[in-house]
Amino acid sequence: MTQPDFSDHKLYDGGRAPNPRRVRIYLAEKGIEVPLVPVDMGALGHKEPTVASRNPLMRLPVLELGDGRVLTESIAICRYFEALCPEPPLFGTGVFGQAEVEMWQRRVELHFMFPVAQAFRHIHPAMKEWEVPQIADWGEANKPKAIGFAAFLNDELAGRPFIAGETISVADITAVVATDFCKPARIAIPDEFVHFRRWHAAMRERPSYPA
């Protein structure tokens, strides 16, 4: 299926940061090409006027449409492309299927990605100037929350290949990005989570993974 032409769009991208990477993996899974505008977050490029004028929250990614309208927040950007390019579906199909993917996406974001991010932002020395105040105890408190949800996912993945069912969804994209971010957050996923590790290995083999 031929995808629409998005050459007049601009995706302001933050490299290996989790949320920009979620959108890039999603676009790769869909086979959608969008011009990227690299932003050096390490040099606080997301706080410069180029980004700040488009997103006052000064966060990435930011999608600018050809007519100048702007969307921020990774899942909102993915939903925009899903509506325009429904195949292959990454937000589920049918009434129940779409709700089920939404349920899992929400669970993964709140109970896995968020605690991983909090651990990283409040423990990693590189985030000292970003997270003010940086509270090490809060970062440490979030580590067992992330591991606990990984255990929950491990049990769920014992009976199916992907988080929301038999096919990949945006919930898997969020989860694989969060899993990869466990390393800089200094969170170790236990080796005994064999189903979780099988799923993660399968996600790493997908062509979209390096996006």
Image: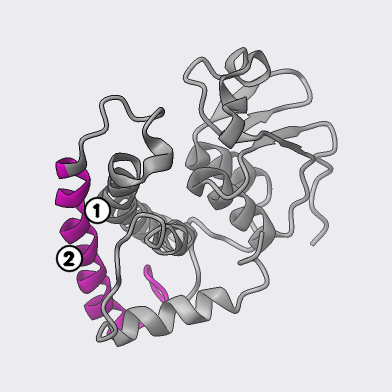
Q: Is residue 191 left or right of residue 21?
A: left
Magenta-colored span: 137-165
Residue at image position (61%, 44%) is: 83
Q: Can the viewer see residue 90?
A: yes
Is 42 one of the magenta-colored residues?
Answer: no
Would residue 187 be found to the left or right of residue 135 on screen? right
The quarter of the picture where residue 53 lies is: top right
Residue in the foreground of this view, choosing between 136 and 34 = 136
Which of the 4 image quarters holds residue 196? bottom left
Asked if residue 185 lies left or right of residue 177, the reply is left
Q: Which residue is mark 1?
A: 111
In the image, taking residue 149 as reference, residue 99 lies left or right, namely right
On whether residue 151 falls in the magenta region, the answer is: yes
- What label sits on residue 148 in the rendered view? 2
- Alpha-carbon neighbours of circle 2 within 10 Å: few (<14), some, or many (≥20)? some
Judging depth in this view, the residue of 61 and 100 nearest the camera is 61
